[in-house]
Amino acid sequence: TLSLRRSCREGICGSCAMNIDGQNTLACLCKVNRDPAHVGKVAPLPHMFVVKDLVVDMSNFYAQYKSIKPYLQKREKAKPGQEYYQSKESRLKLDGLYECILCACCSTSCPSYWWNSDKYLGPAVLLAAYRWIIDSRDDSTAERLAQVDDAFKLYRCKTIMNCATVCPKGLN
């Protein structure tokens, strides 16, 4: 038997992330090489603790995501039925930031994350942090910036861009 995570089969949940033929990807979106001479290789996401077979421990990744407080923070609560207004221009700034499915393909393809995964937040979490930092409805921009302004959390990105290459959603 082979253990692996899977759920949606449509590339929207990220649970089937693994390394296939040397590249991090979602198994549900990866095309099978039908050449009979091709010997495919399947491995768990690199530089993560393996729970079993292709299942990796995502605890650290999710804890880092939780650390950025990925939700709207307001100083005052809205009145019942009241919405937080956002202009169309402000809303457009969020495109390409909220679509991340937290599959960890990008983070586990990043050499800086390999070497410092206990401290460096990695591409997925930094993308999510930026999404909340620029949200015009959020009241905690200064606190969010201060939280990521750290020699390890943010400044370990070396712009190698493996993250953008492997992202199944094409995010950068």
Image (cartoon, rainbow, N blue to C red):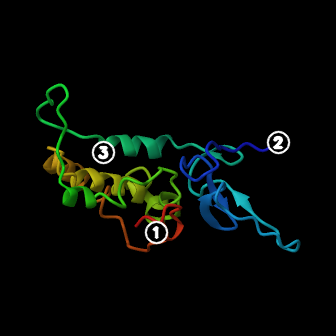
Q: Are there few (<14), some (14-19), or many (20+) residues within 10 Å of tag 2?
A: few
Q: Which residue is mark 3?
A: 68
Disc 1, SS: helix
Residue 89: percent from left, percent from top: 20, 61
- Between the C-alphas of marks 3 and 1, the distance is 21 Å
Q: Are marks 2 and 1 in contact (CB under 8 Å)?
A: no
Corner quadrant of residue 43: bottom right
Disc 2, SS: loop
Q: Are marks 3 and 1 in contact (CB under 8 Å)?
A: no
Residue 80: percent from left, percent from top: 18, 25
Q: Which residue is mark 2?
A: 1
Please say if 38 is above or below 18. below
- Between the C-alphas of marks 2 and 1, the distance is 33 Å
Image quarter in which the C terminus is found: bottom left
Q: Earlier in the sequence, mark 2 or mark 1?
A: 2
Q: Is residue 159 left or right of residue 140?
A: right
Corner quadrant of residue 82: top left
Q: Which residue is mark 1?
A: 164
Disc 3, SS: loop
Residue at 84 percent across and 73 percent down: it is: 35
